[in-house]
Image (cartoon, rainbow, N blue to C red):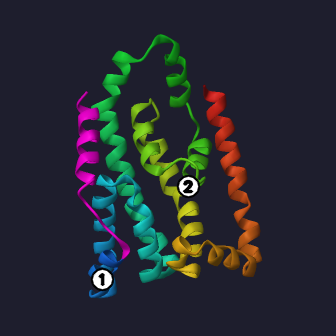
Amino acid sequence: MLFILVLVSFGYLGRYLNIDTKTIQNSLSGFPLAYSAILYVIFYVILTFFIFFSKDVFWLVGAVLFGAYLSTLLIWVAEIINAFILFNLARHLGRSFVDHHLDEKYRHLDEKLGRLSFFWLFIFRAAPLIPHRFLDLGAGLTKIKFRRYLMAVIFGTPFKIFWIQYILAGVGASVFNNPSALVGYFLSNKILFIISLIYPLLVIAVAFKLIARK
């Protein structure tokens, strides 16, 4: 019950935290690179913790300010920190609630999810289908071992991050208000387009795995 109250409180607070690319970009651009990188990670962890769907803003700002490679590294570090916080928040505040209120017919699903292999956890983190926040919280509510999940976070997350950051660094802010710019970017980068076809296959694999677990 406490876990639900915490999530509701975070959601309520998040409604009053309005952020945009200009605000963050102006806040960071005045600092030397090392300081702005550290501040970026701190802002990312704090603000995306309260506003689950604010990551698009940070990913775009990171691509513009730091480029594809450095922004990937910074977001990767921030995502590991967030995964650690959210997983343990769900595990310590929500797992006991699940144990006491889970219907018997769903206990076999809980057991199966707890036995998910590193391979499938890796795919879940690498495929752009399930938001990382929901994965972090969901994994904490199941019997998945933290060390196994953390390894999947560390090794699986960079693939999704770099794919998005590389595109954002190439297209820029116009990716949100001019979809044709994204199409043109893919057409002029055929190798990237071919590599990107891997992602629909990962999404399909994840979807079938989730269906099979029901």
* Magenta part, dominant SS: helix
Q: Position of residue 145 (x, y in %)?
A: 45, 36
Q: How many marks?
A: 2
Q: Position of residue 57 (x, y in %)?
A: 41, 68
Give the amino acid type for the residue marked by disc 1 in the picture: Asn
The dot on residue 26 is 1
Magenta stretch encompasses residue 41: no
| Residue shown at 54% from the left, 18% from the top | 108
Give the amino acid type for the residue marked by disc 2 in the picture: Gly
**For residue 59, which quarter of the picture?**
bottom left
Which badge, 2 or 1, is on the more N-terminal residue? 1
Check the picture and name the quadrant holding the C terminus.
top right
**For residue 30, which quarter of the picture?**
bottom left
Q: Which is more toward the observer, 207 or 145?
A: 207
Q: Tell me: 213 left or right of 53.
A: right
Residue 198 position (above or below residue 121): below
Which residue is disc 2 drawn over? Answer: 156
Magenta stretch encompasses residue 4: yes
> What is the C-alpha distance between the residues marked 2 and 1?
31 Å
Magenta residues, start to end: 1-21
Is residue 42 in view? yes
